[in-house]
Amino acid sequence: MWKFISLYFVIIAQATKLENFYGNWYQAAFYPVSTYAPVCIQYSFSPTSDNVQCTYADGNNATLIQMSIMTDKGQVIQNSPLPVMIVETPAEVMPALNMTCTYGDQETRGHVVLRLVNDNYFIMYHDNEPFIETSNAEVEQNAAFLFVKNLVSESELLQAMMSIEDLKRRRGGLMCVKENYHGNSTPNKV
């Protein structure tokens, strides 16, 4: 009886964790610093109805989440399912990113890793792409995007970037804060 109840709670906890990512988020910062950064991009994450099946090398199925990228007027410019793996700690990020995922007969590393920081921040990790130009690429193991649910000021974002364990020793670029949201032409500080 207890095993059944425990399993039930584990399943509910996993579903609840995924729901924490649903809704509208802004990409607030990115790592490593690149030569180009858009100002404010709004993303929407929601459940997906796609039947795409992706199985990780450890035998677990990937969780699919619907990702939409929107203009400042709310128009969807990209909409696609995204296979994700959710981790709890910074130590889990690289092993999760290094895991392959199989779609039918194709094996790929085309997934992202999500880590919820708190109700207002989460980090999306992916492989460090070769198109990202950075002076310290040799020390950057991955690319990371810091998302914020409710926009914060530049000083609040900098404070968060300096206090989040997996980001505080990295050099990141600011993207979207209250000061540059919706047309304020203040340039990004990188």
Image (tube, rainbow, N blue to C red):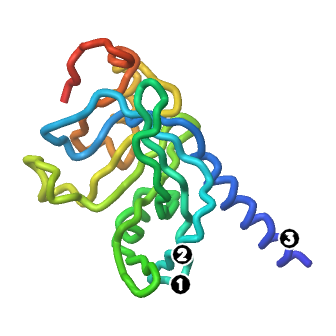
Q: Is residue 151 left or right of residue 173?
A: right
Amino acid type for the residue under numbered disc 1: Gly
Q: Please, which residue is most extreme toward the left here?
A: 135
* Nearer the observer, 71 or 13: 71
Instruction: For marks 3 and 2, give the CA distance.
Output: 28 Å
Q: Residue 171 appears in which quarter of the rendering? A: top left
Q: Residue 169 appears in which quarter of the rendering? A: top left
Circle 2 residues within 10 Å: few <14, some 14–19, many ≥20:
some
Asked if the residue at tag 2 contacts the one at tag 1, i.e. Cβ–Cβ closer than 8 Å, the answer is: no
Asked if the residue at tag 2 contacts the one at tag 3, i.e. Cβ–Cβ closer than 8 Å, the answer is: no
Residue corresponding to mark 1: 59
Numbered disc 2: secondary structure:
loop
Residue drawn where x is 15% and y is 59% of the image: 130
Residue corresponding to mark 2: 53
Q: Is residue 104 left or right of residue 10?
A: left
Residue corresponding to mark 3: 5
Asked if the residue at tag 3 contacts the one at tag 1, i.e. Cβ–Cβ closer than 8 Å, the answer is: no
Q: Which of the two labelled residues, at mark 1 and mark 2, occupies the earlier sequence position?
A: 2
Q: Which of the two labelled residues, at mark 1 and mark 3, occupies the earlier sequence position?
A: 3
Q: Is residue 170 left or right of residue 106?
A: left
